[in-house]
Image: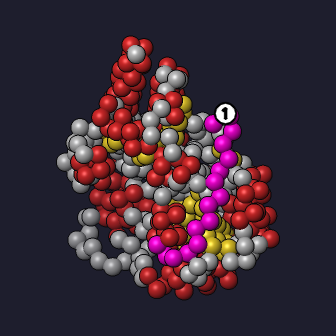
Amino acid sequence: MRYDFSLSACRKETNAEKYTLRNELFGTEDVEPVWVADMDINTPDFVLEAVKKRLEHPIIGYEEVPYSAFDAQREWSKCEHGFEYEVEDMFYSHSVVASIAVAIEAFTKKGEGVIVQTPIYPPFFHSVLNLERELIKNPLKLDAAGRYSFDMADLKSKITSTTKLLLLCSPHNPVGRVWREEELLEILEVCKENNIVVFVDEIHSDLVYKGNKHIPFASLNADAKALTLTAIGVGKSFNMAGFAMSSVIVQDEKLKQQFRLAYDRVHFAQGNVLSHVAFEAAYREGREWVEELKVHLYKNYEELEKVAEEYSEFIKITPIEGTYLAWIDCHGLGLRDKALREFFVKEARLGLNAGISFGREGSGYMRLNFALSSTKMSEIRKRLENALKIRRNRSDTN
């Protein structure tokens, strides 16, 4: 392998969110934070070199996103995912969450319905409620093997004449599903029949593991293209969240006009100069890096699987197909959500996301970010094993 993921730079002296907020969120500095969905893996050297080169010019002022940057993403999408669109279909955005808010403003009015599929990344439902729309929850179905799927009967039963938008997460955060073509086509059929626009968050689309294939929703067919907005970016794939640059692809002209009206009211401008060159470098030079990263990430996931197998009476790992976020079923610990969180903080000394924050369906679960160097992953595994071992010994004694 060309790239070494065994070590990563220390972030404790930077203003990294996951470290800076430890005391505020967990009540102690003595936790390894594995909650924020960025990586404790160094951002690729070819990205950093591009930034250094741009800094040789002494003026950092307003600049337009260069055509070449968006073209690099367009070429990546075509080569990696078979998703074809034009640079003219792309809007700059600093984040997917901001793009969700713009889409809600563009395609719904106050009181109209927006569908989310829980458990889901919390800003999905927070954005709906903050903008005073009706939140329609379409919970995912869970089978005996711990695998999630769409509940199409529930979805159809909840749609009314005022349901205007569906927020789709693909691959799904936090459950790690990579949706199959037949599953996406079912969603498309329902949305087409009911004139529902689909905003799809595909920010994890590059992080899909062997045996699975990401299918961009808008690439399904002409009907999908006509009702879809797609959000993608470099933040997850290359650990570049701090550059605050992503894009929204809107291919249908009518949707594009509606989206632009809301988009222009926000005044996104064109991002910052260093983001432009970093974004382009990632897509031009990052193919080998991402492939090696996925091998490394899956090894980390397997480390968690081994812990779950050893302590299967306490935890189960939801089968993962994409993302670097482990969805851990902790019902075996027999703890309510508050006590479950305290177990991880006080006994495992780990800072995770509480599953309940992803919706009621997340009760009894925890989300762990395993995008870590090998060295840090070993420490996370050790802390989790020790806590579960003590819990087992305590149970045996009682």
Q: Give residue 80's position: percent from left, percent from top.
A: 62, 52
Q: Is residue 233 above or below residue 142?
A: below
* Residue 375, placed above or below residue 235: above
Question: Is residue 144 one of those drawn in magenta?
Answer: yes
* Residue 99 is at least partly visible in this image: no
Q: Which residue is at a point 38% across and 28% down the rendered structure image?
A: 384
Where's the C terminus, which quadrant?
A: top left
Query: Residue at coordinates 53% horizontally, 47% vertically from top-left?
Result: 362
Confirm whether residue 320 shows in the render.
yes
Q: Nearer the viewer, residue 218 or 387?
A: 387
Query: Quick check: 195 above or below 115?
Result: below
Q: Which residue occupies 42% across, 68% down?
A: 94
Looking at the image, residue 170 sits to the left or right of residue 2; the answer is right
Question: Foreground residue, 288 or 30?
Answer: 30
**Residue displayed at 24% across by 45% down:** 27
Query: x and y percent of residue 288 in the render?
Result: 51, 43
Question: Is-magenta flag for residue 257?
Answer: no
Residue 368 placement, left or right of 375: right
Give the residue pinned by disc 1: 145
Q: Residue 56 appears in which quarter of the rendering?
A: bottom left
61 with respect to 1 (left or right): left
Residue segment shown in magenta:
130-146
Q: Residue furthest left?
A: 13
Single out the residue that lies furthest toward the front.
398
- Count of all numbered marks drawn on residues in the image: 1
- On screen, residue 327 above or below 70: above
**Percent coordinates x, y for residue 102 in the rendering:** 51, 76
Please name whichever residue, 172 or 93, is drawn nearer the observer in this view of the structure. Answer: 172
